Image (cartoon, helix red, strand yellow):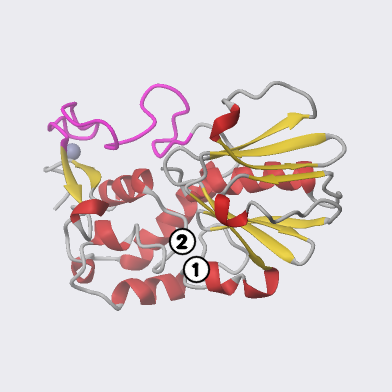
Amino acid sequence: MPEGDTVYRAANALRGALAGTVLTRCDIRVPKFATVDLTGETVHEVLSRGKHLLIRVGDFSVHSHLKMEGTWQIYPNGAKWRQPSFKARAILANSAVTAVGFELGLFEVVRTADEDTVVGYLGPDLLGENWDASVAIGNLRREPDREIGLALLDQRVLAGLGNVYRNELCFLRGALPTRATGDIADLPAMVDLAKRLIEANKDRSTRTTTGRLRGQTFWVYGRDGRPCSRCGTTILRGELGDTELQLRDTYWCPHCQT
Ligand SMILES: [Zn+2]
């Protein structure tokens, strides 16, 4: 599942391709919105809110979430797509380029005035203009008994982190993902590190938390069974989720994290 930095880059690319232009094609293949036609309308802005994408066109906002497999790709008009046409959920084009949303996990069109009904529940956005660390810290402190590994993924608490960052943050702060949020020694430092990591990665295509752009780019994520590069202890893998349906992999070093 993409993290906020991926969505931030997708928004930048879509903004560069579409903002300020008039749509010459609008083909929505999600049944509920298939009759929406924004052809002839101007694209005002494209932005990310946490892991959500908003394309503002005319009086409307095209809201999408990439979920597991989703991607927006931009092609010169007439170019061959890299994914099969049946996976396309939305096609927005101007006189020069075509933006295609493939396998979007969530897609809807709402009036821009009603955007809050779809993204208003999100906590402060790590890559947003109005990022406020104190609000995120306050949200974390409100549920002291909750596992930190769950709280960091909860987009209502703070928006933008996915499974890679939550595992890496827990390692870098020496906390097990199952540790109660109220027992984390320095929550402001955890939030500050989240902001610095995602900022550092927002403009590059290789995500890294170790500072390396090749070789070992993560400390624990995806490294179960291999030695911790700080202490040599074998990294373990488990699952954590609010419900069985929401279980996501966790990775940790049983020596470095307590
Ligand atoms: Zn270790």
Magenta stretch contains residue 199: no
Residue holding disc 2: 159
Which residue appears at 71% of the width and 64% of the height? Answer: 60
Q: In what element is the residue under mark 1?
A: loop
Q: Amino acid at mark 1?
A: Pro
Looking at the rendering, the quadrant in which ligand 1 lies is top left
> Is the C-beta separation of discs 2 and 1 under 8 Å?
yes
Q: Amino acid at mark 2?
A: Ala
Q: Quadrant of residue 178?
A: bottom left
Relative depth, front residue between 252 and 100: 100
Q: Position of residue 12 (x, y in %)?
A: 68, 46
Callout 2: 10 Å neighbours few (<14), some, many (20+)? many
Whichever of labels 2 and 1 marks the residue nearer the N terminus, that label is 1
Cβ of mark 1 under 8 A from ligand 1: no
Q: Report if residue 48 is visible in the image.
A: no
Relative depth, front residue between 68 and 185: 68
Residue holding disc 1: 124
Name the disc covering residue 64, or none.
Answer: none
- Horizontally, residue 222 falls left or right of residue 205, namely left
Q: Position of residue 161 (x, y in %)?
A: 42, 53
Magenta stretch contains residue 225: yes
Which residue appears at 41% of the width and 55% of the height? Answer: 193
Q: Position of residue 101 (x, y in %)?
A: 61, 41
Q: Which residues are magenta?
A: 207-236
